[in-house]
Image (cartoon, rainbow, N blue to C red):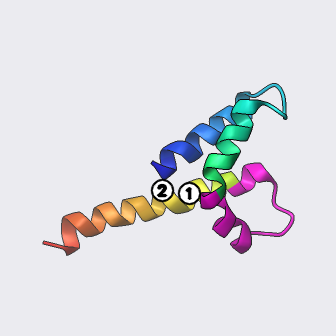
Amino acid sequence: MAVFYLALHKIIARWSRKPDSKLLWFFAVITAPLTSPVKKWSNPDATDDQIVTYALIFYGLVWMLLIFAGRYWLK
């Protein structure tokens, strides 16, 4: 679900015409718990789009690692 919501946030941010859109605000609130740890690790001057991208990559890799661990290590 985390990767899905982060991907939707990225899509909505790219296609949103208004920076104060309620839909963009909704996805910013939903993904805030996912992006806040990544924001601490990233560059201090990173943009919100970069932080969402970093979070999407990080949680995507964690998801793939868990799938790999479930299939090969836990047998």
Q: From this viewpoint, which residue is outermost toward the left? A: 75
**What secondary structure characterizes most of the magenta part?**
helix
As displayed, is residue 40 above or below residue 31?
below
| Residue 38 highlighted magenta (yes or no) | yes
Q: Is residue 75 left or right of residue 55?
A: left
Q: Quadrant of residue 57?
A: bottom right
Q: From this viewpoint, which residue is outermost toward the top? A: 17
> Where are the magenta residues, as a range?
33-51
Q: In the image, residue 1 lies at what x, y percent?
A: 45, 48
Q: In the image, residue 30 lies at what x, y percent?
A: 61, 47
As displayed, is residue 21 above or below residue 75?
above
Please state which of residues 25 and 10 is positioned toward the viewer in this rendering. 25
The residue drawn where x is 67% and y is 33% is 12
Distance from Cα at disc 1 to Cα at disc 2: 5 Å
The residue drawn where x is 69% and y is 31% is 23
For residue 3, the mark is none
Q: Quadrant of residue 55?
A: bottom right
Quadrant the C terminus occupies: bottom left
Q: Is residue 9 left or right of residue 61?
A: right
Contact check, label 1 and label 2, Cβ < 8 Å: yes
Q: Which residue is mark 1?
A: 57
Please state which of residues 2 and 56 is positioned toward the viewer in this rendering. 2
Q: In the image, residue 32 lies at what x, y percent?
A: 66, 55
Crowding at mark 1 (Cα within 10 Å: few <14, some 14-19, many 20+):
some
Q: Which residue is mark 2?
A: 60
Q: Is residue 67 left or right of residue 15?
A: left
Q: Amino acid at mark 1?
A: Ile
Q: Amino acid at mark 2?
A: Gly
The residue drawn where x is 50% and y is 49% is 3
| Residue 70 highlighted magenta (yes or no) | no
**Please, what secondary structure does the residue beneath circle 2 have?**
helix
**Please, what secondary structure does the residue beneath circle 1 have?**
helix
